[in-house]
Structure formats: structure tokens, C-alpha cells
Amino acid sequence: MTYAIETNDLVWSAGRRANAFRLDEVNLRVPQGAMYGFLGPNGAGKTTTIRALVGLLRPKSGRIRVLDHEIPRDIAQALSRVGYVPERPHLYPSLTVAEAIRFHAAFHVRWDQRWADDLTTQFGLDRHRRITALSKGEIGKLMMLLAMAQRPEVLILDEPTDGLDPVVRRDVMMALIEYVAEHDATVFISSHLVHELERICNWVGVMDRGRLVAELPMDAFKSGIKRLRVRQAPPTPGDTPFVVLAREASDGLSASEVWVVRGWQAPMSQWFEGVGASLHEVVDLDLEEGYVELLRTFRRPAA
Amino acid sequence: MFEHIDPQSPTPLYEQIAARIRVAVAAGDLGAGIALPSVRQLAQRLRVNPATVVQAYRALEADGFVDMRHGAGTFIKAVAGERRSQERQDQARQLVRELLASAARMGVSPDDLRHALKDELGAAA
């Protein structure tokens, strides 16, 4: 098994209407041991994809494999090895923290009570407090605790730090890093906090409008997308050794144009001389900028 | 030593971490036999993927800067003075490259740079 999570032409539809939301042939490849950041704007299909991975939605067609288990057929075996933090917590409000932990533990054969205890202390959770009385941050930490103490090989986290303050977010991330360091687990994490993913993830997948529009190692993603400042650019560039994602007149103050390109490598600067243009600047983009530029092109009506 | 690790930089995080350690060795801040933080400790401190720290340590091992002893940890190797000065020269070259790139962006000519550098070096001496 090379991939902890793999989907082949995964299709799902919210209904029969032609304009119903659908996942359109999603092919995910999450390598074993990766920390995979799953990006996309609201409504792109991240949560829908995740719900299909954990067997909560039945695909219309295509194939899903999690740790070599066929989903949804072998969902029980898969879920015994997968920790899942849903977008909206599903805890019984009348239970106390200790009761919620015990309830959850009963479903998992590999439950690590010692670690659950350690984390309860580390997260500063009051064992006797009822779920209804917990703050949003405390709920977030409890959800992570429940997912990790079952000692999963794969953690699937749907916006686990959404709406949490920076201190809680840091606590949660530190615990996650500690878990991964000890167990070599694979982590599949969706988040709007792109900078947070930029720090910890080594793979990136980008969803938009039900499609997976990019999937590659973080370093490749970041080094491949550049903003170029070009002068005397030919109106129709013809064959470029890189993919031009966007091309626009500069701020109007200078004669140069701004190009956003994908698949950039330094020797390609020679191409500009060949077409009589000159390349003035190559600007590196961080994950957020690269991601926004990428989406911009996928959203432009096909030329 | 790891204060300015920048996840938004185009330089991969593992390279940034390895570079910090190389600089510290070249400067003589990290002597032979000193143990580096464990992978887990450093990953938590920097809030990065443990695999990133492993990658940094492996790169340093390949360069002959550290020794990864299984189960015991990662230790700074004795680095010859010659190698340390080589490393400092590499770092100087890197600084100059960054300076040249910024200068080109701002339209500062090589002559302007030479003058400024001479002035500043004179002032520092």
C-alpha cells in the first residue's frame, strides 16, 4: 500500500437536478505518512469529500480506499484505524468530559487511556464539566483528544481549528505534531487557515467546485508558481515552457506586464530573450497567494 | 537559533532549519559532540511536520555536519576549520546574491552598490 487514502473517479451528487452540487471525478492520492493539507474555498466540496471518505455519503460511482479498505463496503474495519474530527462536533451535550471520553473509548479496541488522561490535563479540560458548559475551544480540544486517543493510523480532520483562538490552535497543533512523531500517522486536514497548513503540511490538494484542481508536494507547489514582471511581451506568446495562469497589464505606472505562471524553473528565463521580451523580476508566492492565483484561473470562463 | 523560520518563504522549511544549524556550526556556536534537539522536540517547538525535521537532519548528515545515531539522537560532528571557513564563504556569497537581486529590482546600478558597500564597510571597520 503506497497511499493511505486513494479515490478513483469519485463522483457524488446532491440530487438529480442538473445544477445539484456534485463531486466530479475526484482522484485523491494521499501518500502514507503524509501531512496532507486539503484546501479550497467554501462550498468547494471539501467536507463532502471527507464525508465520503469516512463512509457518511455513498458515492454515485468511483472507488474509495482507506488503508486498503474498500469504502463503504469495509467501513467498520477502516474506521477502527481512522480518527475523524467532523466539521460540526457530535457529542452528547448532557455528558461530562470524562463520560464522553469513556463513551468514545468503548468503540475503540486500541484506545490509549493514558494518553487520553495526559491530554485531558495538557489541554486543561475539566473532567467533571458537562459538554454544554464547554467553550468552543474546549470542544475543539476534546474532539482532537477523542480522535487521537483511539491511536489511529490515519487522522481525517475537517477544519479542526476553525473558530479557535490562536492559543488553543497552537495547543491542538502541538498535540497533533506529537502524535505524528510518535505514531508515523498520516494526516488529512482541511482548513481555511492556509498559513497553518503551510507550516505543517508536506502535501497539498486543492478543491474547487467539486473538482480536485491540483495535488502535489508542498515544496513543488510553492516553488512552481511565480509572479513575473515582463517587458516587451509578445501579444501572443505561442508555446511557453511554463503554464501561464494569468497575464495582466501592470499597475499602469510602468510599461511592464505581470504574468502568473505555473511549472516555473529558473532556466526558463531564457525563453523571454528568445521572443524579444525581457524578464525583470521573478517573485515567489507563498501558499496562500499561489492558491488564490490557481483558483482564479480555474474560475475564468474557458477561452 | 531557529527564531526566523518562515513557512511563507520559498525556501523549503527543511533547508531553512539545516541552514540555521550550518551557520551555528560555522560560527563555532555549536561544537563537536553537542546533541541537537530530538525530532519531536524541534518539530513541536517550530510547529512543523516531524518529517521536515528528519529531512533537515538527514541533509546535514549527508553534508557531514551531524551524526544520526539510532535511538541516541543527532550530534554535531567535528568540522574542520577549513570546512567552517568554506561554509562562511558560502554564506557570504548567498548574502551578496540576495543583495544583488534586491538591487536589480530597485534599479540600483552595480557602481552604486560598490560605492555603498565600500562606505559601509569603512564605517564598520
Image (spheres, helix red, strand yellow):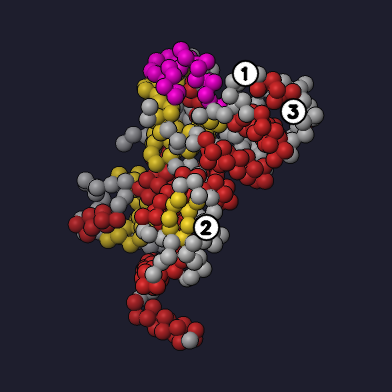
Q: Is residue A68 magenta?
A: yes
Range of magenta residues: A57-84
Give me the C-alpha separation between circle 1 and circle 3.
Answer: 16 Å
| Relative vertical location of residue A30 with respect to residue A194 in this rendering, above or below | above
Q: Nearer the viewer, residue A69 or A220?
A: A69
Query: Which chain is indicated by disc 3?
Result: A
Callout 1, which amino acid?
Phe
Same chain for the residues under marks 1 and 2 in the image? no
Residue A117: x and y in percent read 70, 33
The disc placed on residue B35 is: 2
Callout 2, which amino acid?
Ala
On the question of residue A26 being in view, the answer is no
Q: Check the image and name the residue furthest to the left.
A: A274
Q: Nearer the viewer, residue A29 or A11?
A: A29
Where does label 1 land, which residue?
A: A107
Q: Is residue A41 magenta?
A: no
Callout 3, which amino acid?
Val
Please state if A296 lies on the left or on the right of A98 as rendered: left
Q: How many marks?
A: 3
| Relative vertical location of residue A19 with respect to residue A244 in this rendering, above or below | above
Where does label 3 land, which residue?
A: A97
Residue B84: x and y in percent read 40, 70
Q: Residues within 10 Å of mark 3 (few under 14, many from 20)?
A: many
| Relative vertical location of residue B63 with respect to residue A177 in this rendering, above or below | below
Q: Are marks 3 and 2 in contact (CB under 8 Å)?
A: no
Q: Residues within 10 Å of mark 1 (few under 14, many from 20)?
A: few
Quarter of the N terminus of chain A within the rendering: top left
| Relative vertical location of residue A245 with respect to residue A112 in this rendering, above or below | below
Residue A56: x and y in percent read 53, 17
Please state if A273 lies on the left or on the right of A1 as rendered: left
